[in-house]
Image: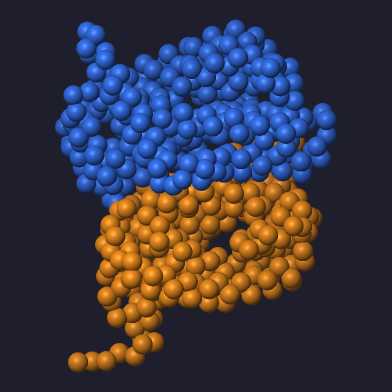
Amino acid sequence: MTQYSPLRIFFKTVVARAYPRVIATWRQVAWIFFDMAFPIVGSLAMVLVYQGLHAPRQYLGFVVMGGAMLAFWQNVLWSMATQFSWDRGNGTLELYTIAPTTFEAVLLGMAVGSMITTTIRAGVILVAGSLLFGISYASGGALAAIGVFLLTLAALYCLGMLLASLFLFYGREAWHLATALQEPVNFLSGLYFPVRALGSYVAGGASLVPMTLGLDAMRQLLLPGTPVFIPVGLETTIVAIQVPLYAVLAGVALRFLETRARSEGKLVTRWE
Amino acid sequence: MGVAIARGWQGYWAAVRLGWAISSNWTRPLLFIVYSVLRPISMALILAVMYAVITHNSAAARPYLAFLIIGTAFWSFIQEGVSEFATGILEDRGRYHVLKYTYLAPLDFPIFLVGRATSKLASASASVVIVLVVGTFALGLPINALAIDYPLLVVACLLAFVAIMAFSVTLSMVLLAGRDSHGYGEIMAQFLYLFSGAIFPISLLPGPLAWLAALSPLGYWLELCRRAILHGRVYEMFPQLSDGEVLGRLVLAVAGTLVLGYFTYLISDRMARRRGYIDMESNW
């Protein structure tokens, strides 16, 4: 019998789990439309609020960039954090458990697949929103902003892996927990306004979600005149630290909760 | 006749209790209350910060803040009544597989749906009150509980609830046609957000959309809520119309929603039975 190296199995698992994420997107075409429409409609509402307040045009750019990042946060919540809970409900988690691979590989595959599809959606939201509202960006900061964006994505999906492990213990609560995390995080991460407006303590606490600092850094780079919370360099460094931090924490949480779930029989509970 | 009414009431009440249990028994009551108010309070705070960033809390702009907060508070009825309700019915079918039994039960199916919607609206009322309290004490809105025009508020809300229920019952029936329509209720609520005048005046919408929004009862309902709570001290969407005129438009729009909802329900119900949507296996 052929023996494959653990590394090969790991990467094959990543590809295998990412594959349905990408392919499944095209199986339900209506969802592509709605996944993009949801943040666009939300952004449009906020743009009209700013217009009602006679805000400077720059603030419309805040909203559009926030709308694009919202697509990622929603994806992290609904397609990463709650995923193991769903998988357990439909019986897939049992298969993951007995498969000769690791949960980390499965999660990484989910993250990679999600990143690809959500980046396309976020790109459409950004382009459509910018054209619709006539927003222009500083081209000088584009390369650096792309770097910050990739770093933020890595940190955000590592946080998603951590949440997936924590959500493993929840049944119906997982759904509600994800819903509960949505709007408060939209508020705390300054999705529609400069995060500096929240004050240093609240914004500092909100920085635990990588989107807060990543979005603020990207705005500083692309929309000159953005009220500065902390300098871009420092924001980027903190986000860079969050990547391995959340990855390690996710691994630890996964081991701990997997052991507990096995002992309590939670890995095979269907639709609690 | 009396027996039929008693049975209908019993079924309605059972549906209300079932809806309440499904909504709330996943956690402890206190946690459920916190969960229920997190979303509307966060939304209100987002708008309050946006307002503060732009206006620097100037006195001249206070009526607009009141406009935003009251609109957000009452929006919870739509969020719960449309989005959560539609999700609940789809869960009944796809996740818990009980919709077919309630459909076959000796009780008119719309009564069951109205009962479920009632529980959603009841749970939303707590978050409405809490957001208004937060608005009063944390954001300094001049809301005085003794000065509210309660008759106007109650009449406007009752009319709006009829429209919301008609809309959400019809929507849930239409959504049964989809195999993977989970989440569409939320998206529909987002679209209504744009047309309701909850957080910006409908006059800001592009021409045709503003015209469409003027046909919806939601804008008139929210206008009356704002007037009932803070008459004269809140930004008004229809300053040229008296309270009575806005109420008249609300009545007309609700009647239109009811008629449209009734016929759409009949069509989608017939289609659901013919094509087997009631007990269709969906993607859960």
Residue at point 57% right, 77% down?
A: A244
Nearer to us in this view, A143 or A102: A102
Indicate the colouring scheme: by chain
Image quarter of residue A55: top right
Side of B112 relative to B128 (left or right): left
Q: Which chain can be seen in blue? A: B
Residue A52 sits above or below residue B266 on the image: below
In percent of width and height, residue A7 lies at: 39, 87
Residue B133 sits above or below residue A237 on the image: above
Side of B226 relative to A98 (left or right): right
Residue at point 80% right, 37% down?
A: B57
Image quarter of residue B154: top right
Image quarter of residue B258: top left
Nearer to us in this view, A129 or B179: B179
- Whether residue A118 is visible to the viewer of this picture, yes or no, is no
Quarter holding the N terminus of chain B is: top left
Number of marks in picture: 0
In percent of width and height, residue A215 lies at: 65, 60
- Whether residue B76 is visible to the viewer of this picture, yes or no, is yes
In percent of width and height, residue A123 lies at: 54, 58
Q: Which chain can be seen in orange? A: A
Residue at point 74% right, 71% down?
A: A233
Residue A207 sits above or below residue B224 on the image: below
Residue at point 24% right, 18% down?
A: B7
Nearer to us in this view, B274 or A240: A240
Side of B7 relative to B64 (left or right): left
In percent of width and height, residue B69 lies at: 66, 32
